[in-house]
Amino acid sequence: MSELIVYTGTQGRARGRRGVQLAESITWQASKQTYGTVRFLVDRDRVADAYRAYAYFRWVDDRLDSDELSASDRLAFVSSQQALVEHVLRGGVNAAALCPEEQLLADLLRGSRAEDAGLRAYVVNMMAVMAFDAERRGRLITEAELATYTRWLATAVTEALHYFIGHDCYTPRGQMRILAVTGAHITHMLRDTLEDIASGYINLPAEVVAAGVDPADVNAPAYRAWVRQRVDLARNCFFAGRAYLEQVESLRCRLAGYAYTARFETVLDAIERDGYRLRADYPERKTPAAALRMGWAALRQSARHPQVLQPAPRMPLAES
């Protein structure tokens, strides 16, 4: 019979503390900004789960990116994690069979109820992102696949934002809900293009490659033209996303959302200055001056009074 992990007694509480410490350590090593966001902005009763959520998927992503795994090993690994999610969501899992990182997921979803739809949406959509990355490595992807991939990621991050920060406050629904994160993901893929190519991930759609664009020649005029289209799309998504964030009731959630988008808009600025030529690194986004500008912009935006939400513009994601 499967066993639901429940921490009881001194030994159980100690194991729970070790799990939180592991989650905090993974988060700290991977992203100082995420660590700080969780520590200072997440609802107090959900801080431990926010660390668990980030740390678990950071671990999965790092395993999938590792050169130690063969293609078949990557697919088998992600399949095992998908099965784990399904088992835990059904209410049970064999605790003895889990490694410490997998226990983070089990602890995160322990006792998850129907009203925790945001948490479930985060986990299910993020796992879909992981599975797609495992499968697409070494092959071209279509424009439709790219759009779906971005939608999964944007849905996951948006729902996590609202689940962990200001979860009992009002948030609008509709097309504009995921657009800020959509813009961030478009920018993220542009930023990591050269690193991804080296790892076997081609972010240029197959349709663009078929038109004669070399996926490795980021300096080619045709490649730069495609990059410009993606930058313009990301800008439009951020513009609409800010209008959405203005409607979010929680000040902490607005602040986190603006800070998240501001870090990616800095990358867009750099890409534009470079004439839409992508490069391997964008160190300017990590400078103290950039951090100060992003922080001030986030504070200024988040302090604005909510505005009337306008209908979302139709974003041509499937054509990008």
Image (cartoon, rainbow, N blue to C red):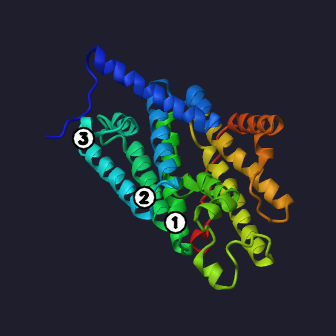
Q: Amino acid at mark 1?
A: Arg
Tag 2 secondary structure: helix
Mark 3 packing: few (<14 Cα in 10 Å), some, or many (20+)?
many
Residue designated by label 3? 93
Can residue 175 be seen here? yes
Identity of the residue drawn at 38% across and 54% down: 77
Mark 2 packing: few (<14 Cα in 10 Å), some, or many (20+)?
many
Measure the C-alpha gap from mark 1 to mark 3. 30 Å
Q: Nearer the viewer, mark 3 or mark 2?
A: 2
Of residue 310 and residue 271, the one placed in the foreground of this image is: 271
Can residue 167 be seen here? no
Q: Position of residue 4 (x, y in %)?
A: 23, 35
Query: Which one is earlier in the sequence, the residue at label 1 or at label 2?
Result: 2
Above or below for 70 versus 225: above
Task: Tell me the number on the disc at residue 26.
Answer: none
Identity of the residue drawn at 72% across and 34% down: 299
Q: Nearer the viewer, mark 1 or mark 3?
A: 1
Quadrant of the image containing the N terminus: top left
Task: Tell me the number on the disc at residue 74.
Answer: 2
Residue designated by label 1? 137
Asked whether the residues under the numbered discs 1 and 3 touch, taking CB atoms below 8 Å apart as contact, a structural biologist would say no
Mark 1 packing: few (<14 Cα in 10 Å), some, or many (20+)?
some
